[in-house]
Image (cartoon, rainbow, N blue to C red):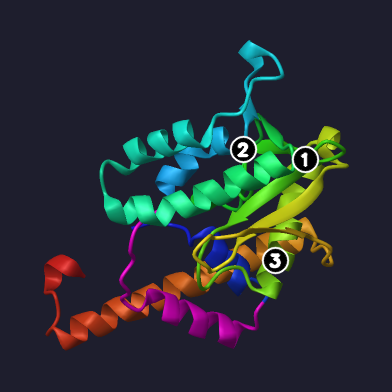
Amino acid sequence: MSNRLPETEVANIAFLPVGQKRRALEAFERPKSIKGSYEPFRRVFPDAINQQFPLFGEGLPQSTWKDLEQRLRVECRGSQQLIDMNSAIAQSTFNYATLNRVSANAIDVVPLRFSSAIVYSFGLEVIVRYPSRAAIVFLDMRRSKNLSTSGQMFMQSALHHRFRVAYPDFANLDLEIWRYRDNKERTLIPQALEAELKTYDEIVSDVLETHAIWESVKRGSGESRRAVGGGGGPLFD
C-alpha cells in the first residue's frame, strides 16, 4: 500500500476544512474499481512532446505519429484496453506539440519532501519550450475526479515552490496544467495558473495534516473490517 496519496487527491483535498478533508478521505478509501493506467503514455511522453537530449544537441526532429503509435502499442503489451486508454491522449499531446511547435528539455530537480516518508514530485521534470516562452507542466489526465479549482490553486503553489523558488534560473517560467477533456479525442486544453500562491510553510502544514487524517481514516477502516469479520486474532493486532 502506498504511503502517500496520489498527487491529484492531495491537491484537491488540500486546504479543505478538516471535516471536509475527512469525508473526502473516507470516500477515497472506499473500495473502487480502477481500470487501466496511463503509464504507457508516460513512457512515450518524451516522443510525443519532442524532447531533446543533450548528447544529440538541439534540433532533433519530432517522431512521426506512426512511430509513436507503434512504441505505445509495445508499451501496452497487446492490451487493447490500455491501447484504447492511452492512444487518444498520446495523439492529443502529439498534435498539440506539433501545432504549437513545442519541444522539451529534461531537468534535474529534487522533489518536495514533507517528511521522511512523504515525498511528492509535482510537475513534469522537463521544461516545455514554446517558440516565445517556456513552462513547467502538470498533466491532468483523468476523465473524472480531476483537479478542482482549489486543486489547481494548490498545484500552482507546489510547482512554484518546487521549481521557481528552489531554482532561481527557473523563476520566470510559466506554470501550466495540461487538462485533457473527457471526450473521444481527449483534447488537450492548457490552463495557465494565476491563483493566489500559498507559502511553502502553509503547503507543508496542510499536506502533513491531510496525511495524518488519512492515517486515522485508514485505521478506522481497518478496525471496522475486523469488527465485521469477527476480528483477526492476536496475530493481527
- In x, y percent, where is residue 200? 76, 56
Q: Amino acid at mark 3?
A: Gln
Assign the C terminus to one quadrant of the image: bottom left
Q: Does 129 appear in magenta?
A: no
Alpha carbon separation for disc pair 1 and 3: 20 Å
Q: Residue at x 48, y 43 (%)?
A: 42
Label 2: how many residues lie within 10 Å, few (<14), some (14-19) or many (20+)?
many
**From the viewer's perspective, is the residue at label 2 or at label 3 nearer?**
2
Label 3: how many residues lie within 10 Å, few (<14), some (14-19) or many (20+)?
many
**From the viewer's perspective, is the residue at label 2 or at label 1 nearer?**
2
- Nearer to us in this view, 230 or 45: 45
| Above or below: residue 114 compared with residue 23 | above
The residue wearing badge 3 is 152
102 on left or right of 80: right
The residue wearing badge 1 is 166
Alpha carbon separation for disc pair 2 and 3: 22 Å
Assign the N terminus to one quadrant of the image: bottom left
Dot placed on the residue nearer the N-terminal end, 2 or 3: 2
Dot placed on the residue nearer the N-terminal end, 1 or 3: 3
The magenta region covers: 16-37
Q: Amino acid at mark 1?
A: Ala
The residue wearing badge 2 is 49
Q: Residue at x 47, y 72 (%)?
A: 214
**Marks 1,3: beta carbons within 8 A:** no
Q: Residue at x 59, y 47 (%)?
A: 93
- Nearer to us in this view, 186 or 29: 186
